[in-house]
Amino acid sequence: MIGAGMGAMAAAARLAVAGRRVTVYERTETHGGALRRHERDGFGFDTGPGLLHLPAVWRDLFVKTGREPLEERVAMAQVEPAVRHVFADGSSVALPGGSRAGTVEALDAALGPGAGERWSELLVRAREVWDATRRPLLEEPLTGAVDRAALGRDPYPARRRGLLRRRPATLTGVARAELRDPRLVALLESHALAHGLDPRRAPASAVVLAYLEHTFGTWYVRGGMRALADAVYERCLERGVEFRFGTAVSRVVVEGGRAVGVELADGTREAADAVVWGAGGPVPAAGDAGEAGGGTGAAAGRLTVLLALRGRRPEGTAHRTVVHTAGPGGTTRTVTVLRPGDPALVPDGEHESAVLSVAVPPHRAGAGRPADRAEAMDWTAGEWAAVDWTAPGAAERCADEALAVADAAGLGLGGRLLWREVRTPADTERETGAPGGAVPAPVLAGADGAFLRAANRTATAGLYRVGGWAHPGGGTAHAGMSGAMAAGLIVEGDDWRGSR
């Protein structure tokens, strides 16, 4: 097993329970991949994902590897309200978690009569996308050209336009045709932006992202998401998984068309019956023409600003606020503000921690820097052009802009600031090994397969992939699904098509 990210650990625990001897090689000194925690002066911050979707994935892991509820290892709570949106015109709405009627009522009250019904009707069509893609995208491994061809067709239902039934080609097309109100358009587009996807390019099927959040809720892990990574790591140890930290793998050893082990950075070779690649980028396999997949593709990076604030968290503060601001060409940009109100993350009750995050271009040394703050935040301006985030001033300008956007929305964070730390895609690349520090999005159907990821089973026998750069793509839950798929293929054979 190469890498100790969440996908790799999910596979390791399942393989160990199935009687396999599992060794995990991790080039850094810790586990969890992007689920890391930064601590300073009694404050704590998630530096990767701060919220959890589809917690059933991890509940299933703990039941299948020990018949123990996940909640006996970590405390989780559903976020309520699920999110507060502040739109570019100054209006706002707080949406409840999992209540269709409550969402309709909230949108009608905030945006005008009929807004809630239009959103509700869109979610009905999004349910059709979910029903069509749930199993092939989330429960079954991706295999062969046939699967890719089928998933390359967009399942979003066509609607009558004049004499013809037509299907919008993109998420923005769906939003503008069916929601009309620019605030509802921004609301739908924000579900793509949250994953670093450009809604003008994302297929119409991306409506499923809004459906998933509305239907299955948004969850917070007490103490931060790092607590989930710790729990999965401990489960692996209990099942006999061996971890070798500070041990980089230079390549996968392939003989006779089959992976037979790994070669470490110091030249040592370790034999294996199967190799699971859980790191970003192409698999470095000897004798292999280069396993496709795992590159950055159309993936954005994340810039996060960790804020240590003086003063109590105001009563009624939403855990997550999405601030919308106007972007180029009629697009919107978003700054997400997480304010968990978790006593474990602050030195005392007279302080608050908050995390701002914004999608930005990935990192490439020597690529130059944004000319100004607006350009720094405008990851939609070009075709995913990279930025040298180590260039003097690049990160601070973007952080200034993100904080200014939040304060213009009335959040009042800047005046309470004790200190801040800025983390860029360059930091992500250094810590996780993801090329450019890009953050992979979940896979989507449509667009001729452009939003799919590399298959879990590679063209090399005995070599498998897990993690965000493999099927079914990015996100903590999706990484866990990739681990289940790889373990199923190894234990049950390459014809395994998922649990039934």
Image (cartoon, rainbow, N blue to C red):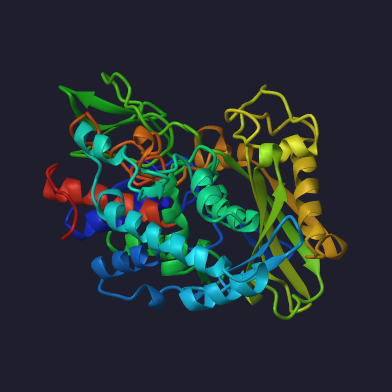
Task: Identify which residue, 209 or 402, lies in the foreground.
Answer: 209
Give residue 268's position: percent from left, percent from top: 33, 30
Identify the residue at image location x=71%, y=56%.
306
Task: Identify which residue, 46 or 243, lies in the foreground.
Answer: 46
> Is 423 drawn above or below residue 390 in the view shown?
below
The N terminus, quarter of image? top left
The C terminus, quarter of image? bottom left
Task: Identify which residue, 429 or 23, lies in the foreground.
Answer: 429
Identify the residue at image location x=50%, y=54%.
178
> Is 68 drawn above or below residue 20 in the view shown?
below
Picture mark count: 0
Residue placed furthest toward the front = 163
Residue 47 in sight from this viewpoint: no
Give residue 347's position: percent from left, percent from top: 72, 72
> In terms of image quadrants, where is residue 130?
bottom left
Relative to residue 400, is residue 251 drawn left or right?
Answer: left
Give residue 182's position: percent from left, percent from top: 64, 53
Residue placed furthest toward the right = 415
Identify the residue at image location x=28%, y=53%.
132
Identify the residue at image location x=15%, y=50%.
491
Residue 304 in sight from this viewpoint: yes
Give residue 137's position: percent from left, percent from top: 30, 49
